[in-house]
Image (tube, rainbow, N blue to C red):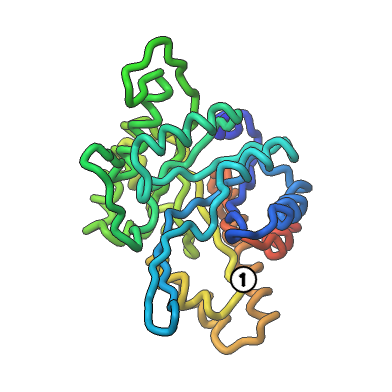
Amino acid sequence: MKVIDYFEKANKTLFSYEIIPPVRGGSIQKVFDLVEKLVPFNPPFIDLTSRSAEVYFEEKDGNKIKKYVRRKRPGTIGISSAIKNKFNIETVPHVLCNGFTKEETEDALIELNYLGIDNILAVRGDDLRFDRKGSNNDKVNKYASDLVVQVSEMNKGIYIENLLDSVASNFCIGVGGYPEKHFESASLNIDIERLKSKVECGADYIVTQMFFDNKVFFDFVKKCRNAGIKVPIIPGIKIISLESHLINLPKFFYLDIPDDLSSKIVGRPKEEIKRTGIEWTQKQVHELIGYGVPCVHFYIMSSANSVVKVLSEF
């Protein structure tokens, strides 16, 4: 079932979740254990993140440095299928531009289609940490909008090669939005125009980067609607549980954390920080439900403990 179908049929705000695959060599059982904790809350879908390969250096024989290129957390496609079949929950694997050619992307989409995965999130992905040398024939999707075009064309039965009797896919396409703008955009208005282009290319819904001030989200939605973006916009929420989040979240996601929240975290005991994060998120969710969002998307990654406590109030 498509994500947007859940939104259209729901008579209340839904809750969805985003998790990460285990590290290379890890156990899928940890993922299953995590999902088991979410099952009582009837998630309509669960997102599975993906990352392109990274470069690692290792010292060999005392004075030689060897370079390795590998993906730290492979398995997005396999885990997406495993969750859907084991728990009967729709999954949304993230499909990346960076690190993959168009042909490799097409192969992944064909595999997802065979596995009965109906939804994908099209994202550019983090900058590559190495120069991938490819032939001149290697064509890549430079931006998420390019990737959306490729998926949309497959939905029409158009593949890279001119194939006879090709079968169209039927993916629901999600894309990312940035209430506090993407760090590469000169302004929020320019960023929203780029977001609009993704929708015009075929995106069915938007899920936002995390934010901690609901006013930022409300203003973002208003600007999107004024720009002519009509698809559902889903707020992304992160529960702060560590003091280090005050540094790492702005560092890696280019966002602001309100003074009212940070002042209650700095220098406080760990349990108090967790409690503050849960209470702040519960307040956010109450306001978002009152605003009428179709779904709240939680970035929980590898632990469900905090989100279970948040949702105990709903």
Foreground residue among 312 and 205: 205
Please identify the quadrant where the N terminus is shown. top right
Q: Position of residue 3 (x, y in %)?
A: 56, 34
Q: Is residue 223 above or below residue 111?
A: below
- Which residue is at a point 35% across and 50% down the rendered structure image? 98
For residue 253, which quarter of the picture?
bottom left
Furthest residue toward front: 61
Q: Position of residue 137 (x, y in %)?
A: 24, 37
Q: Is residue 191 above or below residue 138?
A: below
- Which residue is at a point 23% across and 50% down the rendered structure image? 190
Q: Position of residue 65 (x, y in %)?
A: 38, 75
- Which residue is at a point 55% across and 62% down the rendered structure image? 238
For residue 229, which quarter of the picture?
top left
For the question of whether residue 198 can be seen, the reply is: no
The secondary element bearing badge 1 is classed as: helix
Q: Amino acid at mark 1?
A: Gly
Q: Is residue 27 above or below residue 204?
A: below
For residue 215, which quarter of the picture?
bottom left
Residue under numbered circle 1: 277
